[in-house]
Amino acid sequence: MIQHDVIVVGSGIAGMRCALEIKRTAPQANVAIVTKQYPVRAASVVERTGIAAALGNSSDDSVDAHISDTLAYGKSNNAAAVKALCELAPAAVYELEHMGLPFSRLKTGRIAQQPAYGHSQPRLANAGDQTGHAIVTTLYGEVVRFGIQVYPEQFMLGLVVDGKNVRGVSVLDIRSSEINVINAKVTVLATGSYGQLYANSADSYASTGDGHAAALRAGINLTGMDLVSFHPLGVANTGLIINERVLADGAHLLNASEKRFTNELASLDVVTAAINAEIAAGNGVDGHVWLDVRHLSTSQIRERYPHVLDYAEDFAGVNPKHDLIPVKPTQQATLGGLATDLNGSVAGFEGLYAVGACANNGVHGEQALPGNELAAAVVFAKLAGAAIAAKLGAAVYGNVPSYATSNASDEIEGLLGQKGAHKLGLVRKNLRHAFSSQSASNEQQVGFVHSLRDQFGQIGLHDKNRRFNTELLEALELDRLLDVADAVAKASVAAL
Amino acid sequence: MKVTFRVPRFDAATDFTAKYQIYHVEVTPYTTILDALNIIKEEQDSTLAFRRGSQSGIDGSCGMMVNGRNRLASTTRVMGLNATEIALGPLPGFPVIRDLVVDFDSFFAKDAVMLPYLVTDIAKPEDGKERLQSPKDANRIALAATCNQCGCCTSACPVHWSNGEYYGPSALTRAYRFVEDSRDTAIKARLEIVGSETGVWRCHTIFNCSECPKSIPNGENIQALKRKIMLNKIGLGRIEVKVARTEATV
C-alpha cells in the first residue's frame, strides 16, 4: 500500500494548483497527484477563452463590476463565493504570471484584457486562444520544480471510506490492470466535469465524471447536476467551440437555404434555442446550420479567434474565407458536483476535499460567466490547499478497510468476465445521444438511463488482455457516467 | 466513401513483431482519423488500443504515424489525405506498450531535465502585480509555448531513433521557450543543459521535427540554441543584455 499525506485525484488546473499550495505552505508535506492521463493532457486544456480577473489593465475595471456581472449572469450564485472569487482573481492571475505563464500583453507591458460575453469590461487575461493549455503547462512546470510525485495513467476506482472518514482512493494501473490502494490523511477530488455525457461536447474524452460517481457511491450527495450549459457554435461533428465573439463582430447564422433565421446578437441561450428550433423544423443541413464569416477580414479572424481557421480546416475541411462552417449547439460546461464550502471541504466527511469542476460551491449560479470557471479553478484550489496545509499537522493516517482492495478487484474481475450480448460502444453512444441538446424530456431520460444501466449489465468485454486495456477503461468510465446520468436526469426532473 | 485502414497489433509483453489488421470504415468529409478509430473500436474491434484526449489537438494524446508521417489523429481528416488506404502506426522511436499506445515516461523525464519552469533574478514588482513584458517579447515565446508535447517531433527524429539519450526536439523547444523568455534569467544554466553531451549538438539538422502539428519550427529552435551557445563561448552572448532590455522595453 502506498501512503501520502495528501492524494490529489486529477492533474488539471484545480488539482495541480491545490497540490502546489499545500507544498508551498507546508514544504514537508508528502503530496502526490494521481491522474488517468499524463498531467499535461488534463481536460483543462480545452478551455480556450481567457481567465476572468478585474486587473483594470485595459479599462477602469473594478472587483465590484466583476461581482455584479457574475451575479447578473449566474442569477442564483452564492454571493460569498462570488465575492471571494472576484476579489482573489487578480492576485491569482498575477501569481500565474509570476510562475511564467505566457500571457498576451498590452503595449504597456501589462497583461492584455479581452472583452467577453456577459462582461461589462474587457476582463479576460489570455494566452493567445489556448489559455487553459498555458495554465496547465505552467502549473505542471511548478509541479516539476517542487518535485511533487505524479502517478500517470492510473484510473481512480473509488474513494476508500470508513464510516464518515475518507482514507484515500483505490486505483487501477491502466498499463498493467493492477489495483493499488493509496492511503492518505487527506483526499482531494479534482476530477473535472461530466461533459462526455453529451453527444456534442467541447470537453475532453477524459471528462467522464469519475469523481462525481465516486462520491455518489460513497453516499455523498451531488448538487446542481442539472446545471449544464450549451454553446451555440460547436463545430458540427466535433463539438469544439468557436468563440462567440465572431457573432458580436458580425458573423451570420444561415439555414439550409442559406438565409439568416435569427438575431445573432441576442443572448447565447436565445441563439442556441433558435438554432435548435431551426434544425428541429427541418431547416438544417444534416443536423447543423451554417456559420458565415466570409465577410469578416482574415486578419481580424487571425488576430481575434485564430482557432476558427484551424477548426474549419481540421474538422470541416473548409476555408472560412470562401466556405460556410457547419455548426450546432454543443455542451460547454457542467456545474454540478460535490457541495463544498469555500475551502473545498465536503461537509459530513472527514478528510475529503473537492476542487475545480467536480466541486460546487455555488459560485457560478445557473451558468458560468466566461472566464470565471478558470478563475474559480485556481482561486478555490488555492484556498483549499491552504486550508489542507493548515490542518495537516493534526491529521493522521486512518485504517484502510480490507474490503477496499477486494471491492476494487471484484469490479475489475467482474467486468473482464462479462460475456453479455450488448455492445459497450453502443450503450455509450445511446447514452450520449439521450443527453444531446435536442434530447427527450427529462422524465423519459430517467427511464432511459435505467434501461441503459440494465444493458450495461449485459455487455460483453472482448479484450481480456491486462495490458493497457482501453475497453476495460471505457467500461469503467461508462459505468460511472451512467451513475452521473441518473443524477443529472433526476436533478432535471426535480428542477421542473 | 469507404477507406481501408491497416493497423499494427502488438503487445510488448508477448509479441516479437507486430501483426497487421485490416479494417474498412465508411467516412464523410468530416471524419477524422480519431473518429475512424472510434468507429472501429465501437463497431468492429473493441480490443484495439489507442489514446485519445481533447479531440482538438490541444492536449497531444493522439500522436501517431499516419501514412508515413507523424500527426495528431484528432486533427487529421481522412479525406484530407487523398487516399483510400491508410496505414497507421505507433509513434516510432518510442517503446510500444500495445497497438498504437507508446510509453512517454522517458519523454517526460527529458522534459523535466529542461527546468520547465521560470527561473529568474528579476524581483516581483513590489505592488504584487505582473512583471512587465512587451508584446514583442511575449510573441517570441507564444508559439513555442503552445507545444502540447504530443511527441510527433521527437518521434520523427532519426537521431533520437539511434540514440535514445538525445533530449530530442520537444524537450529542446521547451528549453528554447524559457531561454527566449525575457523574464527568465537562468539562460546560463539552460544553455549548459542543452549544450551537454545529449543536447543540441546531437542534432544533424534533418528537420523532420519541423513538421509539427502546432506548426512550431522545432528544428529552427534547436539551431537558435546552438547559435546562442557559440556566441556566448566567444564572448558575444547577450545574457547580461537580456536583463537590461526587459527593464528598458517597458
Image (cartoon, rainbow, N blue to C red):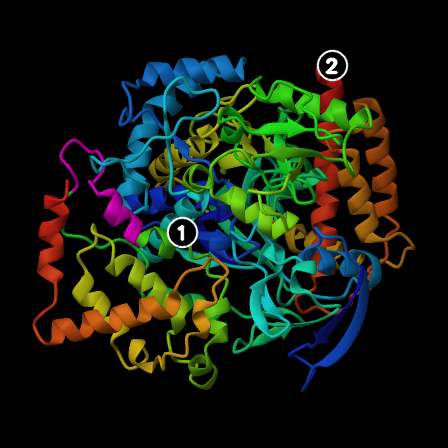
Under tag 2, what secondary structure? Answer: loop
Residue A176 percent across, percent down from the top left:
64, 68
Question: Residue under circle 1?
Answer: A137
Number of callouts in the render? 2
Q: Residue at position x 64%, y 79% from top?
A: B12
Q: In which quarter of the image is residue A435?
A: top right
Q: Residues in magenta?
A: B124-140
Of marks 1 and 2, the one in the foreground:
1
Q: Residue at x 66, y 79 (%)?
A: B13
Left/right placement of residue B125 relative to residue A167 reads left
Mark 1 is on which residue type? Thr
Is residue B167 shown above or below A76?
Answer: below
Of the pair A276 and B154, the residue shown nearer to us: A276
Looking at this view, name the residue that lies furthest to the right.
A421
Label 1 vs 2, first from the N-terminus: 1
Indicate the secondary structure of the residue bearing disc 1.
Answer: helix
What residue did someone put label 2 on?
A: A496
Q: Which quadrant would the N terminus of chain A be assigned to in this image? A: bottom right
Within 10 Å of disc 2 (Cα), the crowding (few <14, some 14-19, many 20+) is: few
Q: Give amino acid for label 2.
A: Leu
Vertical position of residue B39 compared to residue A109: above or below: below
Label disc, if present, on residue A154 of the rendered structure:
none
Q: Can residue B100 be seen in this view?
A: yes
